[in-house]
Image: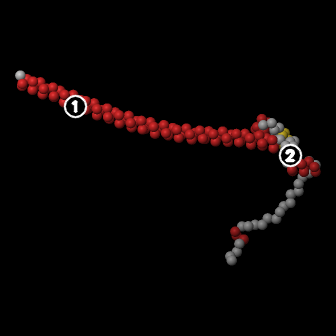
Amino acid sequence: NGTKIADQTAKALNEIITEITKVSSLVEEIATASNEQVSAIDQTSSALGQIDQVTQSQSASAEEGAATAEELSAQSVQLKQILSKFRLSRQINGKIGSMLKEAGITKVAETHEDRKTAAKGKNNKKKLVEEPQINLDDDDFGEF
């Protein structure tokens, strides 16, 4: 009877050792999976940090763009007010003319020359005075 109990005890201990080995293997797998999850969480955290930086940068760029657009709008209003003070006399046509018409400008200001010509009469022609020219070719220079 004692041998039988000893054999049963040895058999039970061998089964316990086998089960302990299985549990140990499962614990190692759980530890490995946990380490992989920690690594994935670190990568996710890093990626979210980068997304946050890009989002902040884009937000700042959008604010700068909006401020620039607002400033340009104000400057265009000022420019339109300044241009409205000029006396307009000649009609304008073409692509530039259509763009100016959209802005409410239908004529361009006379130039100083236009006013001078109109004051003297439209058929006056300017006399061209030929100015003397000096030849500056390198062949004209002597040795010094």
Residue depicted at 45% across the width and 37% down the height: 45
**Mark 2 falls on what kind of element?**
loop
Q: What residue type is labelled 1?
A: Thr
Judge the density around disc 1: few (<14), some (14-19), many (≥20) Cα neighbours within 10 Å: few
Residue furthest to the bottom in view is: 144
Q: In this view, does 69 lie to the left or right of 100?
A: left
Counting residues from the N terminus, which is met first, the one under dot 2 or under dot 1? Answer: 1
Residue bearing the label numbered 1? 21
Q: Nearer the viewer, residue 26 or 64?
A: 26
Amino acid type, callout 2: Glu
Question: Which residue is identified by label 2?
Answer: 110
Residue 126, image x, y percentages: 88, 54
Instruction: Tell me where residue 26 appears, x and y as whole percent.
Output: 28, 30
Q: Give the residue at x 57% y 41%.
A: 57
Which quadrant of the figure contains the N terminus?
A: top left
| In this rendering, position of residue 97 left or right of residue 34 | right
Q: Which x, y percent locates residue 2? A: 6, 24
Labelled pair 2, 1 in contact (Cβ < 8 Å)? no
| Residue found at the far top of this picture | 1
Choose top left, top right, bottom left or bottom right for residue 56: top right
Q: Is residue 98 visible?
A: no
Which of 44 and 79 lies nearest the eye of the viewer?
44
Q: Residue at x 35, y 34 (%)?
A: 34
Seen from the viewer's position, the closer of residues 77 and 24 is 24
